[in-house]
Every structure is written in structure tokens, then in C-alpha cells.
Image: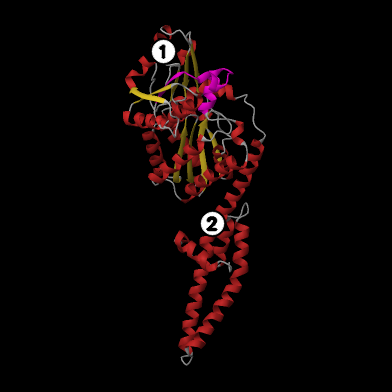
Amino acid sequence: MSLLVVGLSHRSAPVSVLERASLAADAQTKLLQDTLAAEPAVEATVLATCNRIELYADVDKFHAGVAELSTLLARHSGVGLEELTPYLYVHYEDRAVHHLFSVACGLDSMVVGEGQVLGQIKDALALGQELHTAGRLLNDLFQQALRVGKRAHSETGIDRAGQSLVTFGLEQLAAGAPVEAWAKGKRALVIGAGSMSSLAAATLARAGVAEIVVANRTPSRAERLVEILREPGGAGVDASTVEMTAAGAELACADVVVSCTGSTGLVLGADVIATAAEARSSELALLDLAMPRDIDAAAHRLGGVRLVDIESLAEASADAPMAADVDQVRRIVSDEVAAFGAAQRAAHITPTVVALRTMAADVVAGEVARLEGRLPGLDDKQRAEIAQTVRRVVDKLLHAPTVRIKQLASEPGGAGYADALRTLFDLDPETVASVSRADLNDADVKNRGRV
């Protein structure tokens, strides 16, 4: 089986396409279920964020896998396959691993170095685990991606290369002024209470806004966010909630609005924004971090309104300087990809080695039993010494070949060594396939120092 990723992101597709192709939670669930039902895939998980949609799968056929995954993405995103195809990218095997590790480190983000993507990768893995669509390969891959991302942030200064989308968006609204100076004393409206909106609220509180109002379709989640914002150990800011239906009316007295909901339609229309802008004496600053967008793009043309959305963030970040630490992170990614590939290839050979040693143990047991039948006069000590001698001979004969074949299998192109070992020793493929993870762990403990 082989790792395949098919997807689109802000690097390959315009925001208008990404917006239409975005996947709601139920659509992600159905996509994974349908992917596993498709013939080429045995594992799958989806990484869906505000600026990327990627379907990861373990497939047995490359071309059939690409065709099937592309079709499924088109079907569940609602964008026709013919329109979607030019924006899709495909990564296979080591390139797919390299891509995910780069994403985890923030190298492929709209704002280079941002760390929020780690939470999104964690959520993607959790969804695959919950639906039982992520098996050994994808579990290993995504868990390692999380470790690689954390390593990049702890060992380098990649954080200095960029900020989260929230911080970057606020910097664009501030138009060159320090965010703290721009935000101080302002009244903020945060629409939504998910991870991005919560991050926005916390960032605004740290920046010094005077008041935060939270609007959300589920009042309990808004109230919980407000409680956190009010806590002295947290931001300690004046915070309150309003009904989602009152969000439009709040525009008249809010100075800055951040919106990031899971809505499939507009939350703030241009007419509502225009009415609020006319009643104001100061500029209304809007930050839309949703995909698809929450705020009508027509607000860009309204007087007294400054709108920053995903599309304008993409344009602003295109020329953003990259920190010198990026090169160091790229080296980390390359090293980790090589290590992951070696570990996967070595793991591929392990069931065959375990099956070979099991067969050898069965042969030893059979020969010792045959000897006992032919020499019934042997006492217990003699029988034990003979059995131990035969086992030592077999262990010594198998030690060098099994150690060497594990080394060879961990190298690029080493997958064929498992087939060669099965052929040379006439191992039953079904017996090899039946070796469980528990068997492998037990064998590792027993053979540590021998194989």
C-alpha cells in the first residue's frame, strides 16, 4: 500500500474556488466514509482548514487512487470535477510525507511559521480515529507530523517568520501601526466561538481592547468563551454575549469585528454593514477569517469600512519576508521525512522476519521432539541442553541475514527485500499477514540484542 494526498490550497487555487469547495463537518465525515468504501483506499483522513482541503489515503493503485480521490473531493465539495481538477495537486509516497511535515511546520501556510495548523492536523487525525478510517499508516504519519511541527517550533525561530492568521489580519487592519496602539480602548465584536474566534478574542484582549462582545449560534459556547475572557488569570477583559441575530445591530457601536463561523452563507451582508457605517463617525474595521466567507466581499467598496479577508490576506502575505530560520526548518523536514520512510520500510519487513523466526522455532521444536522419540533414555538436563544447542545454531544462522535485511529494507527501494525473504524461505503470505502488532512487540522484546 502507498500514501497518496490529493488536495488544493491557497497556493494552487483562488480564494473563490477554495470558498466554494470548503467542507462542513458532516461533509468531511461522509467524504471519509465514501473514500474508505472506494476500492483503491484502505485508510483515509481529511485536513480541511480555511485555506486548504486535502484528502490523505493509503491506496494500492496510484492512478486509480488519484482518479477516485479527485472525484470524491469534487462530489463532496460541490465544485465540478472539470472545474476543480486544474487546481488540484497530488503528492505520493515520500513527497506526500514531505508535504504534510512542511504543512505541520507552517512552511506551507498563508502566513509562514504560524502554529495553529498543528491543532488542525490534530483534529484531522482525531476525526480519522473517531470514524476508524485512519489505520496504522495514517496514525503513524499524522502523529509524527505533530512531533515534527513541535520540533520545528521548539528548535528554531520559525515563529518569528510569521504569526497566526488572527495576528496577521489585525496587523493588516492596523495599517502599519502597532496592533496594541491601534486596538487600545476599542470595542470588539467576535462572531463565532470556535478555535479561530476564541484565538481572535484572546488576541484582542491581550492587545488592549476595552470590551469584547461574543455572538454565536450556540449561546452556551459564547458564554463559556466570555467566562474565560473575564477570568483574572486570563485576559480579565470586560466581555459579554449577544444573540447571533443581534450581530448586525452591534456593528453600530463596535470598532473592530472578527468573524469566523462555520456558516455556509453570509453572516453580515453588505446592506447591513452599509447601514452601520452610515451611522458611525469612525471607521469600521472588519476581519473575516471564515471559509466560506462570513462577510460580504462587497463591503470592500463601502466608505468608512476597512475589510480584511482571506483573499486580501493571501495577497498581503505573498510578499512577506521569510525568516532565516525557514532554511533550518526545511532541513528538519528533510531529515524527518528520511527517518519516517526508513522506519516505515523497516516495519514492512518486520512481519516477514517474525514469521521466519516463528517457522524456525517450529522446526527446532519438531526436531527436538523427533530426537526425544528416538532417544528415550535422555534425562531432562540432556534434553534441555540439546534443545538449547539447536536453538543457538538456528539463531546464529539467522542473525546476520535478518539484521542485514532490516538494514537493506530501511533504504530507498528496499521494499522488495521482504518479498525476496518470503520467496527464499517459502513463507506463507497469509501467515506473514497475520502477524499482529502485539506479535511484533513481543518479538522485539525477545529478539532485542539478537536480531
Query: Residue 347, labelled with which disc?
Result: 2
The verdict on residue 194 being magenta is no
Give the amino acid type for the residue marked by disc 2 in the picture.
Ala
Percent across and percent down for residue 93 are 56, 45
Of badges 1 and 2, nearer the viewer stands: 1
Left or right of 349 in this view: 232: left
- Say how many tags the image has: 2
Residue for point 52% across, 23% down? 169
Where are the magenta residues, as a range? 165-191
| Residue carrying label 1 | 273
Taking 134 as reference, is 16 above or below it?
above
Q: Quadrant of residue 172?
A: top right
Give the amino acid type for the residue marked by disc 1 in the picture.
Ile
Judging from the image, what secondary structure is the residue with disc 2 in?
A: helix
Percent across and percent down for residue 243 are 32, 22
Colouring convention used in this rendered image of the protein? secondary structure
Taking 340 as reference, is 248 above or below it?
above
The residue most toward the front is: 232
Asked if one can make out residue 436 in the rendered structure from this viewpoint, the answer is no
How many angstroms separate mark 1 from mark 2 (CA)?
58 Å
- Check disc 2: other Cα within 10 Å, few if <14, some if 14-19, many if 20+: some
**Frontmost residue, 193 versus 353:** 193
Left or right of 355 in this view: 194: left
Label whose residue precedes the other's in the sequence (1 or 2):
1
Query: Residue 415, labelled with which disc?
Result: none
